[in-house]
Image (spheres, rainbow, N blue to C red):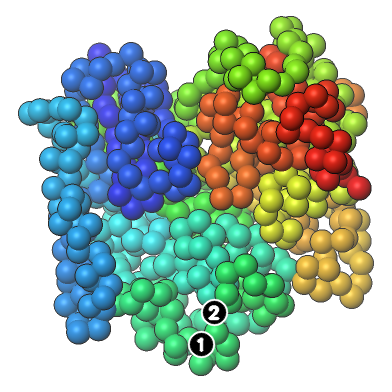
Amino acid sequence: MTSVLGISAYYHDSAAVVVVDGNIVAAAQEERFTRVKHDASFPTGAVDYCLREAGLRAEEVDYVGFYEKPLLKADRLIETYLGVAPRGFRSFLRALPTWLGGKLFMAREMRRALDRHGKRIVFCEHHESHAASAFFPSPFSEAAILTLDGVGEWATATWGIGRDSTIELKQEVKFPHSLGLLYSAFTYYAGFRVNSGEYKLMGLAPYGEPVYADLIRDKLMDIREDGSFRLDLSYFNYCQGLTMTSAKLDRLLGRKPRQPESPLTQDDMNLAASIQRVTEEVMLKSANYIHQQTGLDNLCLAGGVALNCVGAGRILRETPFENIWVQPAAGDAGGALGVAMLIWHQLLGNARQPGSPDGQHGSRLGPRITSHEARAALDDAGVDYTQISDEQTLCDRVAELLAEGKVVGWAQGRMEFGPRALGGRSILGDPRSPKMQSLMNRKIKFRESFRPFAPSVLQEHVHEFFDTRACEDAPYMTLVAAVADEKRRPPTSGLVGLEKLSDQLSDIPAITHVDYSARVQTVDKYRHNKYYRLLQSFYELTGCPLLINTSFNVRGEPIVCTATDAVRCFLATGMDALVLEDFVVLKDDQASHPQFSAEHVAQFSLD
């Protein structure tokens, strides 16, 4: 038996992964254990969990891999500063202590954290990790690979080919020219937080019009037919300053960046629509060029930009590629998986047999909640609960609650690896309810009203509700598809911006975005087990084979990990029910609980 521990850390979304004989045994982000969103620290909690799940002690691990090369990254930092000096001195001084304090001596820091001595630690390049995370767990024996993100060491985008147990990167775009940093610059400009608010910008885009798209193409970047590009760096400040954009961009756009938490304007929405349109254009040009170069039918995607599921959906629909597979943890967390798989296959030369339906195991790779842990957490919280040991009876009861318009916290089995809840740590609702999108955003997630929700749909019914192939396999919520024409309702004329939120655009309004799109997750009986049975029960009860599925957390917090996390989140929000393994907790039954006066419960009602 050969074990490999992969680690990503010290930028954002630190994570750990254990691969044993080529099989992904465990994977988790550090934020789930520390409860610090996007935690960048060394993933001590994630490492401890992964080793426990694999039944290993630290000294028994055969190889340890780190997802990038710190010395090469330091080279980029120093060369960038020298290229803009004396500008950027404050930025350089801010970064220098972090590097001198540990990043330049990563092997020493990792051995200290793991209490390991003399074992080999392997460093691979950042985009190699992304590429490996995309191809090796995919269902393809041969595929083109596209990676897109902010920046690794020097590369910001690469393409290559994966065949059997090897990957080879062919071309790259280098820093400071970066699609990911361009998108993050507009994320900053729209008043959202860089490295976490990009998905908000994507969700805001359909409320606007791409009126600035030509300006972005003409002034900010030169896009070539192969998808490569160069930025006019005078409009940006990320090389030399402490902000993403410069005053020159303010003058070009005739405005200042939006202040965080200030009201959104139509102009903010138009900016979001514009950068989203240009980003999709670059993604499509890149994919078309890669297909011309390779002639392959399959494409694998990773890197933070690959989580732009609108762009990924367009690649599937509008390019010659017949199939695409996006790494569910496409950002830096997935780099831990990539380096582990790269060591097993490419460094050690082990053969690869593509998994069916893939090798990611539904991305349910995190800690599981046991019935004993669930009962202990509920008892500690002092809540009343009911245990339903029979799985079918439990699913039927939860389906009834959902059909009654209840919002249900669903914490079952192993936690998901990656940013999406996939039926392990989810908040669920009825997609037919016209009030549900607003309710869940305002009183449960405590987040911006414009944010859309995703549907989970029984795989055998996906093509009945969405513009997909029959039984399309999309289990990781990484692709956007249009709602089927026959399920749509005409829009109300004259609505603009956030007024569109009031429109009921389909038979499933709670998951239909204002442009008739949805970020689809298909659910099958092999990967999703109890979650599949729940959807089946809801379908048999209502004739609707889908549910709202959003992550089990509130704004500013990571997705819940433990039973205690789930109970705490449930008690602090307007969820009506909590299903924690085989225990059901109803908010209406908690009148005697000190946290649930009648006034407290009433403030979360649908009305």
With respect to residue 19, does 222 lie above or below?
A: below
Q: Residue at x 30, y 68 (%)?
A: 175
Amino acid type, residue under disc 1 in the picture = Asp
Q: Are marks 1 and 2 in contact (CB under 8 Å)?
A: yes
Q: Quadrant of the N terminus?
A: top left
View extreme (left): residue? 118
Classify 10 Å Cα crowding around label 1: few (below 14), some (14-19), many (20 and above).
Answer: some
Residue identifier under label 2: 257
Residue identifier under label 1: 250
Asked if one can make out residue 352 in the rendered structure from this viewpoint, the answer is no
Q: Residue at x 48, y 86 (%)?
A: 249
Amino acid type, residue under disc 2 in the picture = Pro
Q: Residue at x 64, y 36 (%)?
A: 569
Q: At which x and y percent is residue 549?
A: 70, 38
Q: Which mark is residue 99?
A: none
Comparing 193 with 269, the one in front is 193
Residue 457 occupies which quadrant of the picture?
top right
Q: At which x and y percent is residue 193?
A: 51, 63
Residue at mark 1 to residue at mark 2: CA–CA distance:
7 Å
Comparing 151 with 34, the one in front is 34
With respect to residue 295, does 398 lie above or below?
A: above
Comparing 165 with 263, the one in front is 263
Asked if one can make out residue 38 in the rendered structure from this viewpoint, the answer is yes
Is label 2 in a helix, a strand or a loop? loop
Q: Residue at x 60, y 64 (%)?
A: 201
Count of number-bearing discs: 2
View extreme (top): residue? 390
- Earlier in the chain: of badge 1 and badge 2, it is 1
Is label 1 in a helix, a strand or a loop? helix
